[in-house]
Image (tube, helix red, strand yellow):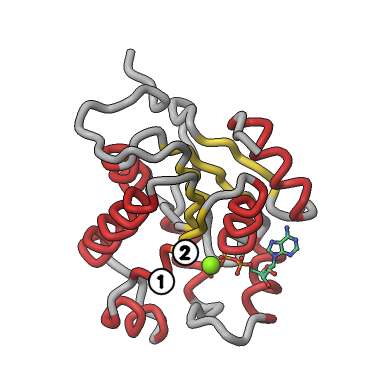
Amino acid sequence: MTTARQTQTDQIGNHNQAIFVIGVSGTGKSTIAKALSDAIDGNFLDADDFHSADNVASMASGVPLTDDMRAGWLQDVCDATLAQNTNTTVACSALKKIYRDAIRARVANCRFVFLDVNTQVLAQRIASRTAHYMPVGLLASQLQTLQLPAPDETDIVTIDGTLPIKAIIQKAIVWHQLRV
Ligand SMILES: Nc1ncnc2c1ncn2[C@@H]1O[C@H](COP(=O)(O)OP(=O)(O)OP(=O)(O)O)[C@@H](O)[C@H]1O
Ligand SMILES: [Mg+2]
């Protein structure tokens, strides 16, 4: 049986470690991916920075992105990850398994940290942010879209995103046996 940890033949790229920090809005993807990149002396990318102007306008007006709207964006995120050619962490929602599979198909040796946070804390976190285009109203659709990691997605570690940031980083490093 092929497991998610195994290298795919159609992958490209030459980087060492690519860790995608995933979850719905407000779980702390950007915060944790940045802190993790500092800890492993790598680069940090935020998938939000790769959205087209149309995608950003759609999200800002409260309209969820379709799979088609995400396809080109995900490809750009993967290509940017591969272009780093060094240890890289990526904040990227990757809510559905097909999105995670698209990443797996393109980025060699990618692994995932899924941040799990309850709805009440998520709403509080999003409401208290000012400089961000994601409105609270999109949270419900994100939670509906979310496909929790399946048992065969063995390249994902689920971590309680309400833990202190340092504890989350430590768990990710230990689980994925990252070089620090
Ligand atoms: N472990 C944590 N403990 C307490 N607060 C946290 C933690 N992680 C993140 N936060 C805070 O929660 C808020 C949301 O975090 P962040 O912006 O990183 O989430 P996100 O998943 O990147 O959201 P989005 O998908 O909307 O970009 C921020 O104000 C951040 O400081
Ligand atoms: Mg973010």
Q: Quadrant of residue 97?
A: top left
Residue in the image at 36% along x and 80% along y: 56
Contact check, label 2 and label 1, Cβ < 8 Å? yes
Residue 57: give x, y in percent of width and height.
34, 85
Q: Is residue 176 above or below residue 135?
A: above
Q: CA distance from mark 2 to mark 1?
A: 6 Å
Give the residue pinned by disc 1: 49
Looking at the rendered structure, the secondary structure element under dot 2 is: strand
* Image mark count: 2
The amino acid sitting under disc 1 is: Asp
Per the image, label 1 sits on a secondary structure element best described as helix
Q: Quadrant of ligand 1?
A: bottom right
Q: Nearer the viewer, residue 179 or 173?
A: 179
Which one is in front, 131 or 158? 131
Q: Which residue is mark 2?
A: 46
Q: Nearer the viewer, residue 135 or 101?
A: 101
Does any atom of ligand 2 lie closer than 8 Å to the CB of label 2? yes
